[in-house]
């Protein structure tokens, strides 16, 4: 096959601003965040639906910082959590209130497939839905990232927000929004560049930005 007949390799696309979806944050959250020395860099969202990856995740403090940042931005960001946690009296309802969404592992379509359909429903109805995920899936040191976030953004055809949780600068920053290509190696390469220089609370627990082997991904 000559070069003129070869198919072009798709490329991940960085979605340019300005972003049309703007939020109004809570002053009390911004004050608390400033009190602990942190700040947020957020310029809005490119669409009503999307997936945000927040990295690196190495400490329980990450959740506290991320929640304060969420309220500072005024962004109704949802996150996955174990279904069993939502059944705990008092704690479960509170978890739902702050954005917890149960993972239904019993779905025949799988966790990602079920959530892709939820995204489709929100897209048809023009409703807001952004899911925030830790790509490592744990605060422990791993050899790479789980594939859930990637499959979800690609399957739902929504933007992927690359979010820094940077303890060296004490900043949560929306670095940019990607339209994934489906070429895993190419997309991960671009994501890796977007996270250069970002440090976690425990630098020794930061996972490399690469896909985990298949068997580890499906655990």
Image (tube, rainbow, N blue to C red):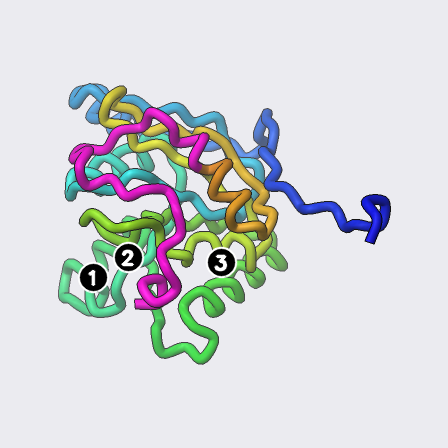
Which label number is shown at residue 92?
1
Question: Is the C-beta separation of discs 1 and 2 under 8 Å?
Answer: yes
Q: Residue drawn at (43%, 27%), measured in percent from left and top?
A: 42
* Image: 129 above or below 198: below
The label number, if any, that marks residue 134 in the structure image: none
The residue at the far front in this view is 1
Q: Secondary structure at mark 1?
A: helix
Of the two numbered discs 3 and 2 on the same chain, state the one appearing first in sequence: 2
Closer to the camera: disc 1 or disc 3? 3
- Direction from residue 23 to residue 59 in the image, left or right: left
Residue nearest the viewer, comparing 119 with 54: 54
Is 154 situated above or below 173?
below
Residue 37 against residue 3 in the figure, above or below: above
Which of pointers 1 and 3 lies earlier in the amino acid sequence?
1
Q: Residue at x 35, y 71 (%)?
A: 104
Q: Which residue is mark 2?
A: 96
* Category of crowding for the residue at label 2, using alpha-carbon neighbours closer than 10 angstroms: few (below 14), some (14–19), many (at least 20): some
Indicate the position of residue 172 as horizontal and vertical percent values. Answer: 32, 29
Q: Residue 182 in the image: x percent, y percent? A: 58, 52
Q: Residue at x 28, y 57 (%)?
A: 96
Alpha carbon distance from label 3 to label 2 = 24 Å
Query: Mark 3 = which residue?
Result: 151
Q: Nearer the viewer, mark 3 or mark 2?
A: 3
Please report the bounds of the magenta region as a residue range.
Answer: 192-219
Q: Secondary structure at mark 2?
A: helix
Locate residue 101, reporting x and y percent. Answer: 34, 59
């Amino acid at each position: 096959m000559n070069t003129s007949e070869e198919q072009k390799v798709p490329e991940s696309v960085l979605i340019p601003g300005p972003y049309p979806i703007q939020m109004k944050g809570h002053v009390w959250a911004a004050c608390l965040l400033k009190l602990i020395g942190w700040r947020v860099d957020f310029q809005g969202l490119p669409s009503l639906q999307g997936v945000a990856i927040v990295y690196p995740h190495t400490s329980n403090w990450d959740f506290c910082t991320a929640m304060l940042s969420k309220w500072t931005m005024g962004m109704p960001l949802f996150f996955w959590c174990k279904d069993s946690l939502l059944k705990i009296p008092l704690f479960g309802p509170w978890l739902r209130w702050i954005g917890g969404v149960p993972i239904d592992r019993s779905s025949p379509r799988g966790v990602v497939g079920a959530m892709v359909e939820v995204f489709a429903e929100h897209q048809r109805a023009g409703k807001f839905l952004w899911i925030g995920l830790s790509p490592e899936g744990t605060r422990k040191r791993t050899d790479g990232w789980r594939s859930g976030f990637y499959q979800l953004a690609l399957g739902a055809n929504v933007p992927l927000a690359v979010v820094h949780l940077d303890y060296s600068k004490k900043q949560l920053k929306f670095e940019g929004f990607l339209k994934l290509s489906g070429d895993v190696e190419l997309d991960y390469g671009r994501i890796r560049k977007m996270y250069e220089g970002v440090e976690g609370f425990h630098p020794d627990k930061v996972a490399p930005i690469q896909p985990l082997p298949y068997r580890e991904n499906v655990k």
